[in-house]
Each structure stands twice: as C-alpha cells, then as structure tokens.
Amino acid sequence: MSRQNDNLLVVIDVQGFELDVIRGIDWSYPPAYIVVEDDLKKSGPISECLTVRGYFYVCGRTDRAYVRR
C-alpha cells in the first residue's frame, strides 16, 4: 500500500544522475512533489518514469516540477 506524505518535496540536482536518484526513492512513501533540474535535457526518460509512478508535469523548463495525483 502506497502512502503519500503531502509535506514532502524532493529537489534533485545531480548533474546527469537524476534518473538514478528517482529510481532509488523509497516508493512506499512517495513524495507529494518532485523538482528535477534538467539542464542536460534528459527529461524524456525522467517524465516517463514519474508518469508510471503517478506524477504529472506541472511546469518549468530547466527546473521541472511534478506533482503526484
């Protein structure tokens, strides 16, 4: 059973390893919001991974914000 922590914000800025960090999140307690720096333009796979986890893109070009449905 997945529980959401509505007060949790995860900000990821790790110079190209964003997807690795996302894959390492403890999804039994998914964050309500995730902000990912995408200065290397790798958002396609990141968006796919987060969409599967129940997130949708809200806004941002370099710093992309996602919220859990």
Image (cartoon, grey):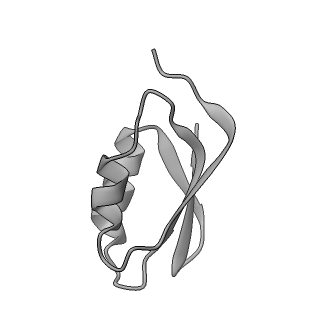
Q: Position of residue 63 (x, y in %)?
A: 55, 75
Q: Nearer the viewer, residue 15 or 32?
A: 15
Q: Nearer the viewer, residue 62 or 3?
A: 3
The residue furthest right is 7
Q: Residue at x 64, y 33 (%)?
A: 5
Q: Position of residue 28 (x, y in %)?
A: 44, 27
Q: Nearer the viewer, residue 36 or 21?
A: 21
Q: Position of residue 33 (x, y in %)?
A: 61, 50
Q: Is residue 69 above or below residue 12?
A: above
Can you tell which quarter of the image residue 60 is in? bottom right
In the picture, the quarter occupied by the N terminus is top left
Q: Residue at x 32, y 47 (%)?
A: 24
The residue furthest top is 1
Q: Residue at x 30, y 76 (%)?
A: 16
Q: Is residue 35 above or below residue 4?
A: below
In this figure, what is the number of numbered marks?
0
Q: Nearer the viewer, residue 23 or 68?
A: 23
Q: Position of residue 3 (x, y in %)?
A: 55, 23
Can you tell which quarter of the image residue 58 is in? bottom right
Can you tell which quarter of the image residue 8 is in? top right
Q: Residue at x 40, y 46 (%)?
A: 51
